[in-house]
Each structure stands twice: as structure tokens, then as C-alpha cells.
Amino acid sequence: MQMLAEVDTPVENEEKAIISARDVSVFYGDKQALNKVSLEIPVNKITSLIGPSGCGKSTFLRCLNRMNDTVEGCRVEGKILLDGADIYDAKVDEVLLRARVGMVFQKPNPFPKSIYDNVAYGPRIHGLAHNKDELDDIVLTSLEKAGLLKEVRDRLNSTGTGLSGGQQQRLCIARALAVQPDIILMDEPCSALDPIATAKVEELIEELRENYTIIIVTHSMQQAARISQKTAFFHLGEIVEVGDTEQLFTSPKDERTQGYITGRFG
């Protein structure tokens, strides 16, 4: 997908980073939401962003596919490199970028269309299928990857909004997968779900890691500890600490991280 101009600034890191954020600051009008955030996102791993409400983690997540561009008065400074190329370069096609960097939101938001059309929507827009058979294959494969096909195979023409909350969220994941992304952003994907649906979505996220890079914002430290390999702790618009998930939760280096994990604030 030729949409990004190369930036000749290699990252020295022991593991391959698919995204490199460098000194990213975000302003909403006069209010600063992020202050010089730098973070490497490793390929084919799950990276959790944790921290108290209003700390900037969702703002950062939305920078990674330029969703903040849709917010009036929002300004982003710094660099975000995807495979070494600047996603904020003027030549970047935002539609193509958002196909490659998919997004699943906090509240399931299926379109008021059939289950089939929800998943087929992106491939139709991007011309990924040349005929009905190819489109059928993309839809069924995406539903299967999202762990939903067995439950909806006999009602693909039923409305997506008629599914349960957990099924709707997995439909939204199938919709993101259908445009063949490399990266999936998830903003509190389980916060509106019951424990059983949450367990299914977490299991799905872990399975998807084999083929996709996943970045998840979560208020649940237990969820971050269960499913992610890398965790970044945000506080007051900055990253306080980042590291392997197990290390960060068992022996954090910063007392603010320790305070948040043990529930002293947040």
C-alpha cells in the first residue's frame, strides 16, 4: 500500500517496532492533553495503555490512525512513524491509513445494516473484492476470525444491531478485520460487556495477536495483565513507565506506577 513517504530515521530496538511515536504532544485548543509522549509498539504483540481517566491514553490511541483529525481545534505535534514512514505527512491518504490501522470502539457500534453488510462495507469501499464470491469469502473469513461465524451463519441478513452486546463487539472486530489491517486499535473494547462476553473478546484478542499488532486502552489492570505483553502507564498526559507487562505489574520502577497499581490513586 504505497501511501507513506519514507523517513530515514531507523529505530534502534531489540524488537521490531511497527509504530514509533516520538515526542507526541496533542492540544485541544489551548488545553494540552499529551506532553512529549514517545512509545515503541512491537509487531505482533498486544500493548496495553493504562492509567486513570483523563490521562491521555485514548487521545494517544486516536493519534495512531489520525482519528483526532476529525476533532475541531485539535493539534498534534511530534512524529508518529508506521514502518518508518510519517503518518502525518501531507501525502498520506487517511482513508488508506485507517484501513491499515483499524479501530474498535468502547461501545459496540454496528451499522444499522445486516450482519453481512456490516462486514462487507469496508471491502466494498476499498475495492478488495472483484465479485460476489470474493466478497462472500472475505465476509465469512472475517466473521470466523472474529469468532462469530458459528453463531450468525444462518442469519447473515439479519440486522447487526439485533445481536447481543458481546456479539456486536465481535461483529465490529470482524468489520475491522475485513479490510486487511496490520494493526488494530481497541479503546476499552470490553467496558460495556458482561464478564462472559469480556472473556470471549479477550480470548479472541489473544488469538488475533498471531497475525495482527494490537494496542488496547483499558481501565482494567487485570485485563492488561492477562492479555498484553507490553504495558505503558499514562498519567497527566505523559508516559510515566513502559515495559514488559509482567515486570511493570510485579516490580514497577516508578512510585506513581506502584501507586496506581495498588489502588492508592486512579
Image (cartoon, grey):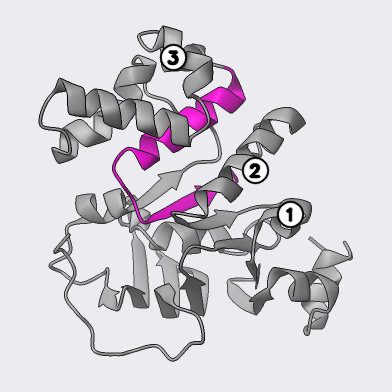
Name the N-terminal-most of marks 2 and 1: 2
Circle 1 — which element?
helix
Q: Which residue is mark 1?
A: 226
Front-most of 20 and 155?
Answer: 155
Q: Whole-Å distance between the Cαs marked 3 and 2?
A: 22 Å
State the quadrant of the C terminus: bottom right
Q: For the residue marked with disc 3, what is the amino acid? A: Arg
Name the N-terminal-most of marks 3 and 2: 3
| Residue drawn at 65 percent across, 60 percent down | 228
| Residue drawn at 35 percent across, 57 percent down | 65
Q: For the residue marked with disc 1, what is the amino acid? A: Arg
Q: Whole-Å distance between the Cαs marked 2 and 1?
A: 9 Å
Within the image, what quadrant is residue 136 found in? Answer: top left
Judge the density around disc 1: few (<14), some (14-19), many (≥20) Cα neighbours within 10 Å. some
**Segment colored magenta:** 164-188
Callout 1–callout 3 Cβ contact below 8 Å: no
Within the image, what quadrant is residue 177 found in? Answer: top left
The dot on residue 153 is 3
Query: What percent of the width, then of the height, locates residue 130?
Result: 10, 31
| Residue drawn at 48 percent across, 64 percent down | 60
Query: What percent of the width, then of the height, locates residue 25?
Result: 44, 75
Q: Left of 219 or right of it: where is 117?
A: left
Regarding residue 233, the answer to whether it shows in the image is yes
Front-most of 110 and 158?
Answer: 158
Regarding residue 172, the answer to whether it shows in the image is no
Q: Which residue is mark 2?
A: 202
Callout 2–callout 1 Cβ contact below 8 Å: yes
Judge the density around disc 3: few (<14), some (14-19), many (≥20) Cα neighbours within 10 Å. some
Image depth: mark 3 or mark 2 in front: 3
Callout 3–callout 2 Cβ contact below 8 Å: no
